[in-house]
Amino acid sequence: MKYLDEIRKNLAERREQGLFRQRSELETLQGAHIRVDGKEYINFSSNDYLGLSSNPELIATARAAAAHWGVGSGASHLVCGHFSAHENFERDFARFVGKPAALSFSTGYMANLGVISALAGRGDAVFADKLNHASLNDACVLSRAEFKRYPHNDMAALERLLSASTASHKLIVSDTIFSMDGDIAPLKELLALAERYDALLYLDDAHGFGVLGNGRGALAEFGLSSPRLIYLATLGKAAGVSGAAVAAELDIIDWLINAARSYIYTTAAPPLLAETLSKSLELIAEENWRREHLQRLVALFREGLSDHAARLMESSTPIQPVLVETNAQALRMSAALKEAGFWIAAIRPPTVPTPRLRVTLTAAHSEDDVKNLAACLRKLLEEAA
Ligand code: PMP
């Protein structure tokens, strides 16, 4: 079959170029220490920033919630799949991030598709940072609005696009912490531009929720508050569970319930997850030591690589990419790190503009884990030079 032959050829080319994607099976819990194919690794690839994914209190909550609610929701939210566990979590979440109302989605990807395509359509315009997450870009395309991308964090370029736009409605879309670089968008400036040009501002805080602002995320960290601000947290990262929640004015949430297709036409997430997430919010609020430890690890990692500072990015967050020259070098270094017992993903184009090792630190790591990783990276970078 011709089409299948073309797919095979495409796969073969990807293999040759070092771009073939493959999965690995974890044989243990997610965490700082994992086993893959019978070998133990220190894991520097997960987004489980606070180390909550295997937290005993959350596991106990999930068990009890499964016994109470069962394991499946059985329907979409608007049919008969919306439980008081979902409602309670949404109320807890809205209060936690300081917004009037919230809505939970099954994943961050689905939230982005649903929110952006509900708030922007033909005749409207979305303005998006070039390094935004793939799910935001997909959502902008899906919305059928005019899709205007500005160079990373370039507020002057964004302002030029906004001032030239004649669209009926304007929506600015940005990651808060950029997922592959670890830097933070100029959020105050984004909000000021949204106010000046009468736009809505949608912020994807997938990597900031639980980490920034004493755990309450980017809005709390930078003191941002405005009815034109729509906030997204994903809940499979620092919150340690799964799903996503959007917080906004009540009327925007009501509009999403009526118009966000990825909310309406999908089975609700199991209520046991919503109940577990409410408990996760409590741990995020109470256990400040997790963030304090994480910040110490970030400083330790950057100190450990200070002789190779040019390889690091301007990041004060747990996402600490190490830049390398080529895809081949990224794969070689990732393999050498694995040999040495460190699990670190090589991230290559087209996911990112330039190849890198994406190191993520979590509260489950020890200082020694991080010192040992920095020493191993130093050695590999010196050998490659
Ligand atoms: N936004 C950003 C910035 C992300 O990094 C991710 C996940 N990698 C998502 C959205 C999607 O979230 P989820 O994994 O819950 O679909």
Image (spheres, rainbow, N blue to C red):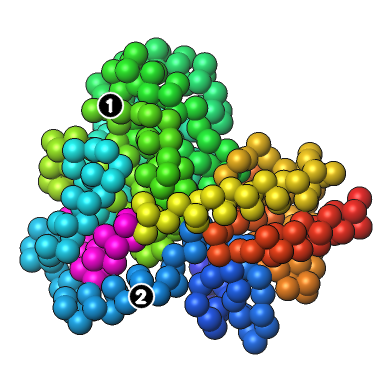
Give me the residue at 57% from left, 38% from top: 183
Q: What secondary structure is found at the residue carrying circle 2?
A: helix
Q: What secondary structure is found at the residue carrying circle 1?
A: loop
Q: Amino acid at mark 1?
A: Ser
Q: Is residue 75 above or below residue 26?
A: above
Horizontal side of 209 relative to 338 (left or right) equals left
Give me the residue at 51% from left, 72% from top: 30
Question: Which residue has dot 1 on it?
Answer: 226
Horizontal side of 25 relative to 225 (left or right) equals right
Horizontal side of 30 relative to 172 (left or right) equals right
Q: Which mark is residue 270?
A: none
Question: Which residue has dot 2 on it?
Answer: 59
> Residue at the bottom extreme?
38
Residue 18 showing in the rendered view: no
Q: Is residue 11 above or below residue 171?
A: below
Magenta highlight range: 264-282
Q: Would you say residue 270 sits in the magenta stretch? A: yes
Q: Position of residue 74 (x, y in %)?
A: 15, 73
Residue toward you, 102 or 161:
102
Q: Position of residue 114 (x, y in %)?
A: 27, 48
Horizontal side of 133 relative to 320 (left or right) equals left
Q: Position of residue 297 (x, y in %)?
A: 64, 53
**Mark 1 surroundings within 10 Å by alpha-carbon count, few (fewer than 14), some (14 through 19), many (20 or more):** some
Q: Is residue 240 above or below residue 101?
A: below
Q: Amino acid at mark 2?
A: Ile
